[in-house]
Image (cartoon, grey):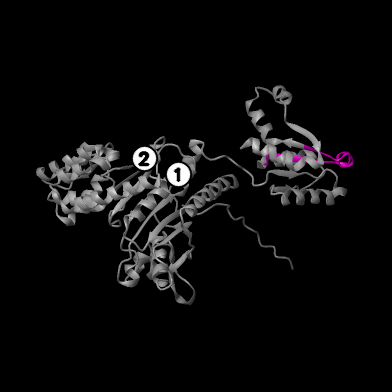
Amino acid sequence: MADKRKRTKVKPEVLKGFRDYPPAEQIAREAMLATVRESLELNGFLPLQTPSLEFAATLLGDHYTSETLGELFGFTGPEETEMALRYEFTVSLARFVAANQQDLPLPFRRYQYGNVWRVDKPGPGRYREFMQFDIDIIGTRNRLADAEIIATMVATLDRLEIERFSVRFSHREMLNGVIAWASVAPERATDVMRVIDKLEKQGEEAVLLELGPGRVDSSGDRIPGLGLSEEQIARLRDFLQLAPSVTHQSLQSIVELTNDNEQVVTGCRELTEIVEALDALGSNQSQFRIDPTIVRGLGYYTGPVFETTLDDLPDYGSVFSGGRYDNLVERFLNRSIPAVGASIGVDRLLAALKHLGALREQAATAVALVTVMDPERITDYLAMVAELRSAGLATELYVGDTRNISKQVRYADRVGIPFAIIAGSDEFASGQVTVKNLARGREQAAAASDRDEWLKAAGFQETIARADLIPFLRKQLNSRD
């Protein structure tokens, strides 16, 4: 007997904090990633891939609790193993380095990209699953490694054809020295840095108030202050007023301001070494600069820190940032292995590229659709497809209902394929094919004021010798680049 139970429809929706990437967007993203990979490999970085799932102890340490596991996408898997989806790549990198320390040549340059997962509350532009792209150099304290990371950041953004950007960098050791010079207790250094980090967005007056009695923000909310003394605030104010004009040539002014504080001297010396290395590498000086107020990850970085902003899109925030962290594998080896690295905000950078017009829109992977006008000649159409593909021209054969040629052409136009190739019995007999330039047709349609003007526009389609098809398509594609 047939099952007569009523079937219910499943609502076609994604989970909160997750999203789909339609083909046009994914093609653009893959094109950007390919350019980034080319740049990184040109600079000697090696690809690494690690599992999406790790032991809970790997991600959280041996003393994790059910509460801390709940802060990740954690669960009990097969064999009663507690595990979680990775929330970033650094811990997995640390685990890999610790597990392969005997066979892994150091320094180790690696890049890795892929999806990561965080339970954080979703918001505009903030998802629970997103792509991260990291580069790191592990196993050396040499400042040349820091310079190489920054040089690679500059080279990568250049390769993406972003004309106006700035990689700004500072040094945590120098900042710690400034805070010590201001007579702020070491245990309060993180709080002070957290406030200094707001300088660019909030301005000097707001930062000074927050270092002292507190302030009221633009929404009317009360922001509590750190309650520093007037003398401490005065010293920090002197630093904040000096910082914007500092270059690597004038770093000595911070040393003099802080009475030759040892940490400041060390930090400034290492910043100078980085700049000198960048100059020797040929990096464009207009694309990087020292900014002594850059803080980055409060409890994470131990040396130079850097972040990249786009001059024409300052509201996009940092798109490629990082720094030195010398406590990489301590969890696994009870000793540190130094490292320096940076991370790309993939979706943020992609949105910026599209906004700047630095990434060509492409809705399809195929450059040509071979239509089927005469089903009895299907072997000829298949041979044409094979020939085009062998020549390196991505080609799609129309495999839907072939009774209507107009429908086939509309399909190609709809999915964004630039060219439709049409051949019937007459064309095969005369050794010709017709090529419809759908990409040009779309451009003409966008520019035309009415249908008659569009129909009169030249170059929409052309009948050519069958033997000339491959060079003709190549010429047309080259003219579009």
Would you identify the image quadrant in which residue 311 lies?
Answer: top left
Q: Position of residue 358 (x, y in %)?
A: 51, 38
| Whether residue 366 is visible | yes
Q: Is 184 left, or right, of 109 in this rendering?
A: left
Residue 409, quarter of the rendered image: top right
Name the residue: 39% across, 54% down.
Answer: 120
Please state which amino acid type lies under the numbered disc 1. Answer: Leu
The one of 232 and 415 positioned closer to us in this rendering = 232
Q: Is residue 425 magenta?
A: yes
- The residue where tag 2 is placed is 285
Which span is picked out in magenta? Answer: 417-434
From the viewer's perspective, is 463 left or right of 154? right
Within the magenta stretch, is there residue 439?
no
Disc on the earlier residue, 2 or 1: 1
**Image vertical order of residue 94 relative to residue 390, above or below:** below
Instruction: Indicate the quadrant containing the C terminus: top left, top right, bottom left or bottom right.
Output: top right
